[in-house]
Image: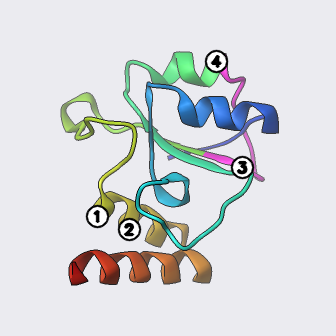
Amino acid sequence: AYKLRAHPSMLQPLLDDPRAVRSGASVSRLAVDLIAVGDAELYVRQADAPSVIDEYSLIPSKQPNVVVRVPPADLWLFDNGEAPWPVVVVDLLDARDDRSVRAANDLARRVRAR
């Protein structure tokens, strides 16, 4: 995963970019119980990553507000703008902070109870 920094004005356009697949706290349709205002977590195709990073002026940072995951081309599993719930859960767990882990457990519990 690339831990990057974007100007705050670029976050929403980045999340809305059709080349980006939202994950973690950035998903909207799963009602993740975690507000990550000012952050973006997404997947980008390997072929699109250089242009996305360049167009949004994303720079490596020790204080990232963007996490970009770039899976190998043959492992691209997404067909719309948001990752499926199991991927979101794993990405939330990967954040390793208490709030994200709690949100991951809550999401997994709610989806399994359906």
Callout 4 environment at 10 Å: few (<14), some (14 to 19), or many (20+)? few
Which amino acid lies under the numbered mark 3 shown in the image of this protein?
Answer: Pro
Between marks 1 and 3, how big is the CA–CA gap? 24 Å
Residue at disc 2, secondary structure? helix
The answer to whether any part of residue 97 appears in the image is: no
- The residues tagged by marks 1 and 2 sit, at their Cα atoms, a distance apart of 5 Å
Q: Residues within 10 Å of mark 1 (few under 14, many from 20)?
A: few
What residue would you read off at disc 2?
A: 89
> x%, y% of residue 21?
42, 39
Alpha carbon distance from label 3 to label 4: 16 Å
Instruction: Give the mark toward the camera: 2 or 3.
Output: 2
Q: Is residue 102 left or right of residue 12?
A: left
Judge whether 85 appears above or below 113 on screen.
above
Q: Which residue is disc 3 drawn over? A: 64
Say which quadrant the C terminus sits in. bottom left
Q: Is residue 69 above or below residue 103?
A: above
Let me know if residue 20 appears in the view: yes
Identify the residue position indicated by label 1 in the image: 86
Relative image position of residue 92 (x, y in whole percent): 47, 67
Which of the marked residues, 1 or 3, is nearer the chain's N terminus?
3
Instruction: First in sequence, mark 2 or 3: give its number.
Output: 3
- Residue 20: image x %, image y %? 46, 32
As drawn, the label of residue 10 is none
Type of residue at label 4?
Answer: Asp
Residue 65 shown in magenta: yes
Q: Which portion, as a residue range, is magenta?
A: 55-66
Callout 3: SS: loop
